[in-house]
Amino acid sequence: MPEFVVAAESRTEKGKNANRRLRANGRIPGIVYSGGKEAVAVAVSPKEIGGILRSVSGENTLFDLEFDGARRKVILKDFQREPIGGRLIHADFFEVALDKPIEVKVHVELVGVPVGVKTQGGMLDFVTRELEITSLPLDIPAKIVIDVSTFEIGRYVRVSELPSSDKYKILTDADVVIAHVTAPRGEEATATEAAPAEGGTEPEVIKKGKEPGEAAASEGDKKGDKKPEKKSDKKDKK
């Protein structure tokens, strides 16, 4: 893993206008946080921070932030991008101690094409893409890899099924589903419609016929559809 050293400058001016001027000069504002110490406002190069984010370990990369004649071992705490264009506009850092564990989120990577997708026409649903872990700064994994090539339709993997590691501990709830292979949507809908109601078979639909009396009344109604003229109507016609 390459070592990164980012040059930083302490800054005293704050506010939107000061930040705009800083960005216009090719720098972005940032803050260095440290347990038990006062936060320090700094300015850094967005290109250097972008290079760290594009590295193998990404935002969990441990690197040196150099300012005020000293180096501090830090990790990215947070960063912001422009909604349009994605340009970096802010970065926060957290100073770490190499002998103390920290909590971070690590990306999950799925490898392989599931059997349920390749031969059964199913779909792979990637549900949980990040897991929260605790680890010493130097033992943070770049990612957690899961092989899903043997997964058939209906197969899923939960956090509890992941192998344990002596380098880190997963904090995400053990029952959380990471990925599963589902049947094609058309088959799911057909299976749902065809399934009988819980607790018994689907009731038979019986068409009810008319009773003899009802039939006679119905015939009578048909014959008497034409109403006789009223006497008053006949007088009017004369």
Image: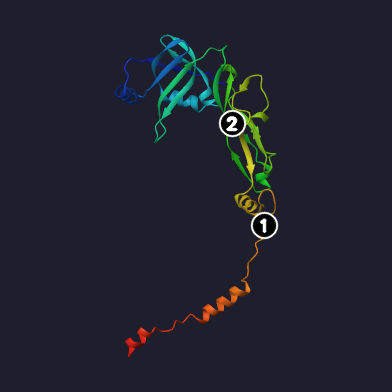
The answer to which of marks 2 and 1 sits earlier in the sequence is 2
Where's residue 18, x and y in %?
31, 21
**Frontmost residue, 1 versus 220:** 220
Looking at the image, residue 23 sits to the left or right of residue 187; the answer is left
Out of 197 and 158, give the one closest to the viewer: 197
Q: Where is residue 207 drawn, in percent x and y?
A: 63, 66
User: Which quadrant of the figure contains the N terminus?
Assistant: top right
**Whole-percent x and y of residue 6?**
45, 18
Q: Judge whether 81 appears above or below 121 on screen.
A: above
**In this rendering, position of residue 139 left or right of residue 225:** right
Q: What residue type is labelled 2?
A: Val
Q: Label 1 near label 2: C-beta < 8 Å?
A: no
Residue 5: image x %, image y %? 48, 17
| Tally of numbered discs | 2
At label 1, counting other C-alpha atoms closer than 10 Å, the crowd grade (few under 14, some 14-19, many 20 or more) is few
**Location of mark 2 (residue):** 108
Residue furthest out toward the left? 17
Name the residue at 46% across, 24% down: 78
The secondary element bearing badge 2 is classed as strand
Residue found 59% across the figure and 31% down from its top: 108
Q: In the rendering, which numbered label is found on residue 47? A: none
Instruction: Tell me the kind of residue under disc 1.
Output: Pro
Left or right, 90 with respect to 195, comes to: left
Residue depth check, mark 2 versus mark 1: number of the one nearer the observer: 1
Above or below, 127 relative to 119: above
Q: Quadrant of residue 21?
A: top left
At x 63%, y 39%, the residue is 180
Q: Is residue 104 visible?
A: yes
Left or right of residue 161, residue 130 in this image: left
- Residue topped by disc 1: 203
The C terminus, quarter of image: bottom left
Q: For mark 1, give the secondary structure.
A: loop
